[in-house]
Image: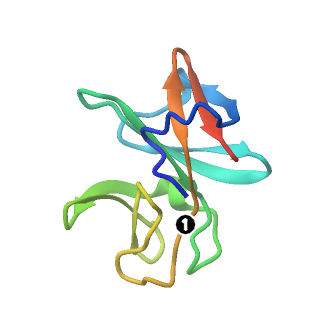
Amino acid sequence: MRPSNTARDPHADWRPLCRTADLVAGSGIVALAGGQQVALFYLPDSEPQVFAIGNRDPKSGANVIGRGLVGHLGGDLVIASPLYKQHFRLRDGACLEYPEQHLPVWPVRLCGERVEISLG
């Protein structure tokens, strides 16, 4: 899957997911997209970014990733799972500690007052 913060595929099927007012700076929220729980992380730096990553922790099976802490580790922007503290890169969902663990990511963009996701 592609990184989710800068996707501009003109052929993507963009769908509204939530409003930008629903996002919490530097933190996660969870939305339902195509029957899946998606954790959204909003980083309003000089150029605002939003990332869409799977909410289900692959180690525990619990839907908790949206409650994780955002940080930097080894030069990567990561989310730490709140249960077992493993770190997942926001750009591609790879787990830094356990290569066999991976979270899905989706292209997502800010479009005016909407947050849009491409599930295709």
Q: Can you tell which quarter of the image residue 10 is in?
A: top right
The total of numbered circles placed on residues is 1
Q: Residue at x 38, y 35 (%)?
A: 49
- Does residue 16 appear to the left or right of 105 in the view shown? right
* Residue where numbered disc 1 is placed: 103
x then y, percent, for residue 82: 45, 66
Residue 41, placed above or below residue 69 = above
Q: Position of residue 109 (x, y in %)?
A: 51, 32
From the viewer's perspective, is 49 left or right of 72? right
Indicate the quadrant containing the N terminus: top left, top right, bottom left or bottom right.
bottom right
Residue 35 picture location, percent across and down: 80, 51
63 over 85 or under it: above or below: above
Viewer-closest of 118 and 62: 118
- Residue at point 72%, 45% (across, down): 32
- The amino acid type, in three-letter code, at marker 1 is Leu
Q: Nearer the viewer, residue 40 or 117?
A: 117
- Specify the farthest residue to the front: 11
Relative to residue 86, is residue 80 depicted above or below? above
Q: Label 1 crowding class (10 Å Cα cut-off): few <14, some 14-19, many 20+?
A: some
Figure colour scheme? rainbow
